[in-house]
Every structure is written in C-alpha cells, then in structure tokens.
Image (cartoon, rainbow, N blue to C red):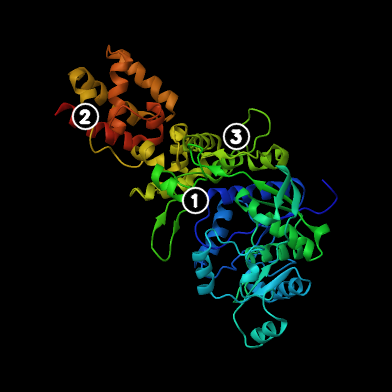
Amino acid sequence: MSNQQVRVRFAPSPTGGLHLGGVRTVLFNYLFARKHNGTFILRIEDTDQNRYVEGAEAYIFDCLKWCGLNPDESALTGGPFAPYRQSERKPLYREYAEKLVMHGHAYYAFDTPEELEQKRKEVPNFQYGSAYRNEMRNSLSLTEHEVEQLLKDGTPHVVRIKMPEDETISFVDMLRGPVSFDTNTVDDKVLLKADNMPTYHLAVVVDDYLMKISHAFRGEEWLPSAPVHLLLWEYLGWKDSMPEWAHLPLILKPDGHGKLSKRDGSRLGFPVYAMSWTDPKTGELTPGFRELGFLPEAFLNLLAMLGWNDGTDQEIFTLDELVSKFSMDRVSKAGAKFDYEKAKWYNAEWIKKIDSDRLVAECKVALQNKGITVESDEYLAKAIELVKDRLVLINDIYEHAWYFFKQPEEYDLNAVKPKWNETKTELFKTFIKQIEETENWSAADLENNFKALIAEKGLKAGDAMLPLRVMLVGGKFGPHVFDIVALLGKQETIARVEKALQAFTA
C-alpha cells in the first residue's frame, strides 16, 4: 500500500432493485476503505435517462443504510467533489469529449438510428470500428467542411472513441494479475450521446479522475470495457493518476452455471435483492433479504464469504472483524456459487449470537404482520430469548412464539386424552391452587413445586409434563415448559390450565 490516500467508490445506476452482487461490491469497497483509513464514496451514475427509474436512488441509499455501509461522500451527505450525481455534472463531460476529438482520439458520428440499423442488417455482427468506420457518416469519412456544416446546423451526433488498430493494451488487475486486450476486437464506443449526456465509459473515467479515486473495484462483467477506459486515461493525459483496478468475481447461480439473476431467485424461491423492490411501472414486487427475515449482520457476513475468506475456518464475522481481516489478496478471481441454505445458516447463527433486545423491532413487525399486537418490548425480548435458537429467519418468530401472545384455540388431544384420568384432573386442580399461592415466580422453583406435587399424587413426571405443555401451547412443542410458565405469569397460566381442563375432561 503506497502513501496515497485511499478513495474508493460505488457507482450504481438508479434503474431498479439492488442485486446482492452490487451490495457485495459496496462491502468490499467499504472494507478496503475502512482497513486503510480511506474514504468511501457513493456516486450515482444516472446518465442513461431512458433507464432511470423513479425512487431507485432513494432505495439504494435505504439499502446501504440498512446494511450499515454508509458512504462518507454522496449526493445525500455532500463532500468536496460534489455534485455526486452524473446528471448534475453534465456540462463538464462535453469539454473532455471535445478535447479527445481535437487530439484525434475521438470523432463525431452523425449516423441516424435508421442508418445504423441498415448496416446491422447488411453486416452480421456489425461493429462500429476500424473495419467499417470509413463507410459510415462521421468526421473521419466526411470532409472538414461537411463536418463544420453539420455541426453548425445542429445535426444530432455522438462522439465515439477512435480505437487504434493492431495494438495490445495491458494492465495489472489486483485479483487477476496481467490482463491484455487486442484493440481490433473492441469497437469505437460512444463516449458522448446526442443529448450531451456521457456514456458510462467517458463519465467513469472523468469522475474517477476528478474525485481522485485510488482504487476501482467493480464486477468482472466490466472487464471487456477496460481497454476503452485504459485508453481514455492515457488520451486525457491522466495515465499516472489511474486507480488500481480489481474486477470482482461473479456471484453464480446455485448450480454454478452463469451469473445469478432476479429470475433465478423467482424460479428457485429465494431473494436476490437486499430489500424488497416494487417496480413503479409494472407494480411487480421483488422480495428482499430484509423483508424475508434476514439480519443485516448475517447478510453482510454471507456476502463477504462469497468470494473471500481470511485463510482460516472462521465463518462468522462481525463488520469490525471483516474490516480488520479484509485484504484483496484473499479475494478469489473465480465465481462464487450462491447457496440459499448456507445463507439461512448464517442468519440462524447471527440470531443466536445477537442480543435479544436488538431483535425486538424486527420480531415485532413480523408478529404484527400476523395480527399479533405486542404490548411490551420487554416481554417480547424474553420470549425471543426462549426461542431464538429455533429461528432461521426473523419471520419464524410467529411459528415459534405465537403462544406467548394468545391462548391456543385447539389442543393436541391425541397426545393427552388416551391416558387422561381422574388423578390427573385432581393434580391440575391442585396445581392451580399451588401456583395461586406461589410467591417466588421462577422457572426452577415452579418446576420443583410441580414435581413434588406429581410425586405426592403417585404419578411420573412425564405423565404430567406433557399435558401441562399441551395446556399452555396447544401441542408438543416449545421451549422448556416452566420457562413458558414463568414468562406467561400467574394469571395467564391459571387461565390456560382451567380452559384446557374443560377440553381434556369433556
């Protein structure tokens, strides 16, 4: 690591939901910045106005807030290199495009969409580059006078980079080592569109330079664009300021074949977005990890392990631990298969690990969604503590804890009635009197008192414990039965035993 200040950025397009691969890119940027006392920047790349989706930018910020990966500089927080939305930086890109044209590294192209479409019909796999650029309508094929007149008339045009012929362009990727490209395989990408908006290729280079970005981490799908970006850094005279690059491995489908997509999640029944996203145009809801009951700590933990490890067998990491242990040389260049069962395992482990008070807010929402009103956060925290080892997702709280909030409406009578007798009826009537008089309301004392009562009636513990459990929760499930009694309290326990006795003796 040089003495250069670390400045990294995540630069999403506000076009829809935030894919877990995008959040992993944020995470690796964030960890690298924090590890090196650097700065993490969020830059909104909204140059493609046709794909811009209302609400998507706010959604991105909400996702990062939920994850706890808040940027140091952004369109919301501001910073020394504002503005952080490319649409607000529009005037400055034209200057750099014109500079490239002036030095012969780019050119004006006046081809209409119809002319381009016609060429694509004539030439299979048409690429606008060295092989065909002189057959097209641009400032390389037209006379200087014709170009001047077209510009003077305000003829719609784009600016394209002029890719050199028969050259090899190389750079050293932090993950992949030396990477080389043959310029003949790369077309003359559009840098500035007819509406004066830059394309990603121009904007990312200009903004990374002006914002003094030191390291650029992005998905490997951007690797084919690298030769265009390398040339722009060189042509604009900024080669010595170019950030170090790392092209992160893809997150793959569970079978390992191809990049994980939203459709894969829909098909296989798991989320691929950080938070639920509703498309404002279609109304289609895509569920997210948060709404399905994942903790942000677990979500970040599982993402970190998709393509990185610290070289040990440790799998559960806090964010602080990830910061201290993270290094790019431990990031794999091979794609990482997404395993939803493993993702759920991380969540279950984090639910066990985390303080029950911290789970109250999420569990309360999950219970309210099932029609249960939680009147006491303290009571809910105690209920969570009793069942948290059984939860995989936060939303499982209803299945495992509903009986702490409402009485059972039916009972597993098959578990009780075949062996029910008058002795047991008398036992539970006496038990009601016993707990009415009990002052020390602890699970241990309650259990000891009950067991003494069972022995007095000449019964075995198992003959009475199971009926008591069914009385309290309706079936053969739940945590230790006297932990349930202790939490329900005296009046509620008595009410449930009395109600169940009527059902058992009917």
Q: Residue at x 68, y 70 (%)?
A: 83
306 sits left or right of 390 in the view: right
Instruction: Tell me the tag on residue 193.
Output: none
**Numbered marks: total:** 3
Q: How crowded is the residue under tag 2: few (<14 C-alpha within 10 Å), some, or many (20+)? A: some
Mark 1 residue type: Tyr
User: Mark 3 or mark 2: which comes first in sequence?
Assistant: 3
| Residue 433 can be seen, yes or no | no
Q: As displayed, is residue 430 above or below residue 290?
A: above
Report which residue position mark 3 lands on: 316
Inter-mark Cα distance, 1 to 3: 22 Å
Q: Which residue is mark 1?
A: 273
Q: Residue at x 53, y 73 (%)?
A: 115
Of the 4 image quadrants, the one containing the C terminus is top left
Q: Is residue 290 left or right of residue 103?
A: left
Q: Which residue is mark 2?
A: 501
Give residue 253's position: percent from left, percent from top.
49, 41
Query: What's the amino acid at mark 3?
Result: Ile
Crowding around mark 3 (Cα neighbors within 10 Å: few <14, some 14 to 19, many 20+) is: some
**Outermost residue to the right:** 3
Indicate which disc, 1 or 3, sits on the residue closer to the N terminus. Answer: 1
SS at mark 1 in the image: loop
**Residue 128, located in which quarter of the rendered image?**
bottom right
**Against 350, is 452 above or below?**
above
Vertical order, 443 against 29 (above or below): above
Residue 304 x %, y %: 61, 41
- Please determine whether, in this image, residue 119 is positioned above or below residue 443: below
Q: Tell me the mark number nearer the camera, choosing from 3 and 2.
A: 3
Do the residues under discs 1 and 3 have CB atoms within 8 angstroms?
no
Q: Is residue 472 visible?
A: yes
